[in-house]
Amino acid sequence: AQRVTQPEKLLSVFKGAPVELKCNYSYSGSPELFWYVQYSRQRLQLLLRHISRESIKGFTADLNKGETSFHLKKPFAQEEDSAMYYCALKGTETSGSRLTFGEGTQLTVNP
Amino acid sequence: GAGVSQTPSNKVTEKGKYVELRCDPISGHTALYWYRQSLGQGPEFLIYFQGTGAADDSGLPNDRFFAVRPEGSVSTLKIQRTERGDSAVYLCASRETGGRELFFGEGSRLTVL
């Protein structure tokens, strides 16, 4: 079975402060991890994926297999980062192409 | 249109009624997914199509739920004898062959009274 846990439902920071959205996963094989974001009144969209090792809108995320974590980080939060963030896992063995999502973290960046 | 299109955007029905939700994926995308999102929860997987066939339907909660994709493009999610617990936003997503990114529609909000 595959499972994604986002321990914080709500996270509030001030503009310019660092932000970290936590994500832990449970999967017996070698997973692919993603972060999806939903801005207000917009559809869910991909933010970044671990295999690309990229930085999008200043966000980065490193897959830590020892801690089974994929935390999302940004050194200086901006007001436009306020959104709902979902961590998601794709198994690479028998579970096919299904994405399993966490419950999400609502990030609010205050001015 | 360039994105995934879902209709209706809102549907209110009475308990026991039958409902159909439609998804029109991005042209050329062979993979299509249905997810259900209840209030305060993340998207929950229902079913995945590769072409016309359901490659994984293990997320369908019971036999009241059924989905089809007869021509490998548009898909319809069908819910029989709706219950109040079926109230949720139903999301559709598509993916191109070999791609890793899911492209989501805006969802169909179902309310069962």
Image: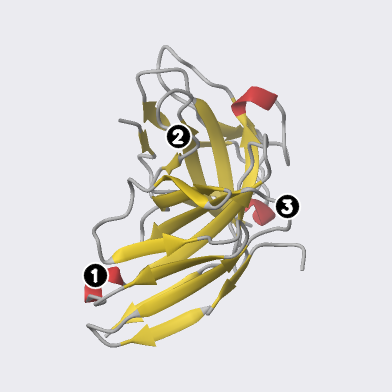
Q: Which residue is mark 3?
A: B28
Residue found at the far right of this picture: B2
Residue A59 or residue A34, whichever sits in front: A34
Question: What amino acid is labelled 1 in the image?
Answer: Gly
Mark 2 vs mark 3: give the one in front.
3
Q: Chain of mark 2?
A: A
Q: Secondary structure at mark 2?
A: loop
Q: Which residue is mark 1?
A: B85
Residue A108 can be seen in this image: no
Does A6 sit above or below residue A63?
Answer: below
- Give how far across and how far down residue A22 sits, in percent: 45, 34
- Give how far across and how far down residue A77 sits, in percent: 65, 44
Label 2–label 3 contact, CB within 8 A: no
* C-alpha separation, residue under disc 2 versus residue under disc 3: 35 Å
Residue at 39%, 40% in the rendered image: A6
Residue at 73%, 52% in the rendered image: B28
